[in-house]
Image (cartoon, rainbow, N blue to C red):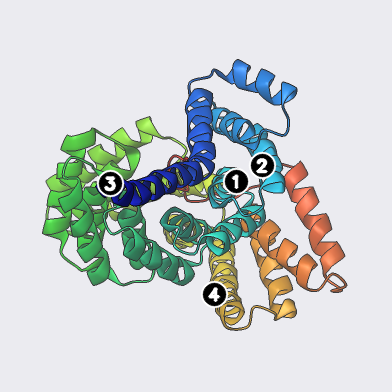
Amino acid sequence: MLARILGTPLRRLLVLLVVLAGVAGVVYLPRARRHLHERRLQSMSLAQLEALVRERPEDAAARYQLARGYSRSGRLADASRELVKVVNQTPQDAKALNDLGVAYLLQNRFYEALLALQGATQAQPKFAAAWANLGRLHLTTKMPFTAERELEKAAALAPKDYLTLCDLGEAYLQTLNAKSARRVFEQARSLKPGQVQAVIGLGHAFESLGQPEEARKALETALEMQGETPQLLTSLARIRLKRAASEDDVAAAQSLLDRASRLDPEDPEIWYELGRIELRQKRDAVAIIRFRRALSLSPQHSGALNNLATALQRTGDLDAARRARKKVREIALRGREETRLEERLQRQPNDWDSAAGLAAIYLAEGKLGLAALTIRRLQDGQPKHPRLPELRDRLRAARSTGQAGRFPAAQSGQPEGR
């Protein structure tokens, strides 16, 4: 009797366990197989992945790993092509969309990057890396207030992400919010004391806050951590010049800039600062050479133009000085108009006349990536706009002659993996 009483619930329990095991197999076995497949793919060489994708083109996971392999090898166009195919196969794959956005961003294909990264955040609204990369895109395309909001969201989702905090600090610097920049750079430094990026950012934040001694200490610490770079040497020289009380101070600043120029002779800021030293020492003929070198690298550098006009005036070349000052005024007017149109489009993104005007300014300044982004938005939003054919023709002509502006480097890091 007791055995029969116990037997019935025991049999039921056994049946229940068998059913649960079957359900678990249905749910978890495909996931386990997928995980094992991805582990195997990650161990394959680029040639093996290429062969596998040729054999099994429907295998999105293999194609994704192939794209990452291309990206690691610097073959960004190939990586983009494969990631587009992955997204076509799995349209809601947020990580593939994010990686595609990064690949486009690193190629200065800003419009495509924007679409891919927006797709990633729509597919996965709490995807911190995608929000951070959107912020980096908008830092690169001179929209720091938009970048600030996106990087704040990324930092809220991933508060211990060092690179996101550093990029948020850079956004705060660009929006003239130096106190917040100092706060997030200090937060980043506390996370990774041995990393130099936050220390450099802290130095720039102190400089913006009018604390040159603290800025100097931070930048000299960064110099000890990573060695000499042109940017660090130039920043230290600029701080020394601001506080120069003697010829020795000026000579020390010049020595820093001379070392920077040997490391990167293509940086216009170095030649601009060297020109300022020559102008200060009343060596006008040498100053003219330095400022013209800066302008050959950055034709719209208004500081170099303005100081060049002063040097030319002092050497008696009054016509050249007038021409330089006229160009300074033109650049200033264009800069104000550029800022006005950018702010207007922030408030009214469908103001297509303002978009056309802004694209024309970007083309005049050689900012071809920004011009292409704005023209593409105009083309999508108002394909029959009367200025569109002319703007497209100017962009094609500028690209064919190799005309291009200098853009900040996108700090996108390694694309997120699966």
Q: Pointer 4: what residue?
A: 339
Mark 4 or mark 2: whose residue is earlier in sequence: 2
Q: Do the numbered discs 1 and 2 sit on residues whose CB atoms are within 8 Å? A: yes
- Left or right, 336 with respect to 414, comes to right
Identity of the residue drawn at 65% across and 37% down? 60
Identify residue type, mark 4.
Thr
Q: Pointers 2 and 3 in contact (CB under 8 A)?
A: no
Q: Nearer the viewer, mark 4 or mark 1?
A: 1
Secondary structure at numbered mark 2: helix
Residue 55's spot in the image, x, y percent?
A: 73, 21
Residue denoted by label 3: 197
The tag on residue 100 is: 1
Q: Hey, what amino acid is under mark 2?
A: Val
Q: CA distance from mark 2 to mark 3?
A: 34 Å
Image spot of residue 161 (x, y percent): 31, 52
Q: Which numbered disc flags the more N-terminal residue, 1 or 2?
A: 2
